[in-house]
Image (tube, rainbow, N blue to C red):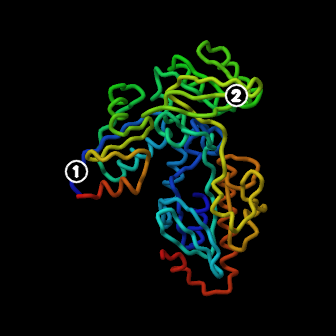
Amino acid sequence: MSAKNVVVYSTPTCPYCHQVKQYLKDKGVEFVEYNVAADMDARNTMVQKSGQLGVPVIDVDGNIVVGFNRSKLEELLSKS
Amino acid sequence: MTAGVYAARKQISTLIITENVGGQALWSSGVENYLGYIYITGAELVQKFEEHLKTFDVELEFARVIGLHRVGGEFRVDTEGGESYTARAVIVAAGKSPRLLDVPGEKEFTGRGVTYCSTCDAPLFAGMDVAVVGGGNSGLDAVIQLMRICPKVYLIEIAPNLRADEILQEKVRSAENVEILTRTLVKEIHGDDFVTGITVENLETRDRRTIDVKGVFVEIGLVPNADFVKELVALNRYGEIPVDCGAWTGVPGLYAAGDVTDVPEKQIICAAGDGAKAALGAYSYLVRLPVSLDWSDKINKQ
């Protein structure tokens, strides 16, 4: 598996965000994390990328996943 | 998950089909009545459940179940992705989902201003005017979170009075930027790319008005995820699955546990206990089946 560029947009209170981050850690996937509750620039970027106002949003090499969708993430992460 | 642990310990070949791990327990910001933990967040407790479950040989399949049918002496479980599974016994522990407003614009703008998880999404709406629909405890919890970060919060309740605990009501009433609209119904949600406003109607005067908001937090209770068992079980008037004290539904081999059932107390500890009862019930059922005891291939992906 080649290294992916993974970004997670989350809020500290969102349980699904914690689950996503735990999932990525368990899989040994490195990711950059933005707290969109505090970082308004990141919030705007997230809204622009996803067209959504909800967390978590995960960006895998430019592919956007809204919500903790395991099968979608699995698919994107295993793509070579 | 408790049912999974109990089933695994009885060495039943077990598959858990679920959309997520944790269900409603995840949403709880703090749990102070699950024994062994004086205080733990719902997310942390769920993580511990998952760790515990994973010490056993239980398979997890992430999918949404859309159908449950009896085929011969077995059950067939259909998922949204088109997969089917057969099993000799089934435990339904599907929990509840947020109740929808069922108004025009709601589906369209879900995730684009309309949200059902205020704990998740509230911070995203900092600096915006928002509406919270529902005057129960979860609605007022959302208002309290939002009134600190939003210029204006509208609280919309269909009944003449709020149902939330007095202590929450006091907090909300003392806030200057919260407007409470009782006897009020949401008629429509509108917007372009995102929500721009809602139309509400006062049920006494029949007056309609449009309120400019960018966020709509829907907190009007939960509905059981029991639609897929309708064919086999008559649901009660709340849409819950009736069970006896052994978590049995009355259909041979079909058990149910937790918030999806008619058990009156919706608590994590009660649901966990129900899960244990359901798995033990299913075990007793399986050992009495007049078939070979080789269960190794009894859950078959078709």
Is B179 rendered above or below residue B267? above
Q: Residues within 10 Å of mark 2 (few under 14, many from 20)?
A: many
The chain to which mark 2 is attached is B
Dot 2 lies on which element? Answer: strand
Amino acid on which the number 1 mark rests in the picture: Ala
Please report, as a chain letter, where disc 1 is located: A
- Residue B46 x %, y %: 53, 48
Tell me which residue sits at (60%, 25%) in the image. B143
- Name the quadrant containing residue B234: bottom right
At horizontal 64% and vertical 82% (from top left) the residue drawn is B72
| Kind of element beneath mark 1 | loop
B3 shown above or below A10: below
The residue tagged 2 is B184
Q: Is residue A54 left or right of residue B86?
A: left
Of badges 1 and 2, the one in the foreground is: 2
Residue appearing at x 57%, y 49% in the figure: B23
Disc sitting over residue A3 in the figure: 1
Question: What residue is shown at x 37% (from left), y 51% (from top)?
Answer: A26
Percent coordinates x, y for residue B296 in the rendering? 52, 79
Circle 1 crowding by C-alpha within 10 Å: few under 14, some 14–19, many from 20: few
- Given residues B237 and B49, the one toward you in this image is B237
Residue B183, x across and y down, in percent:
74, 27
Identify the image quadrant of residue A74. bottom left
Q: Residue furthest top?
A: B176
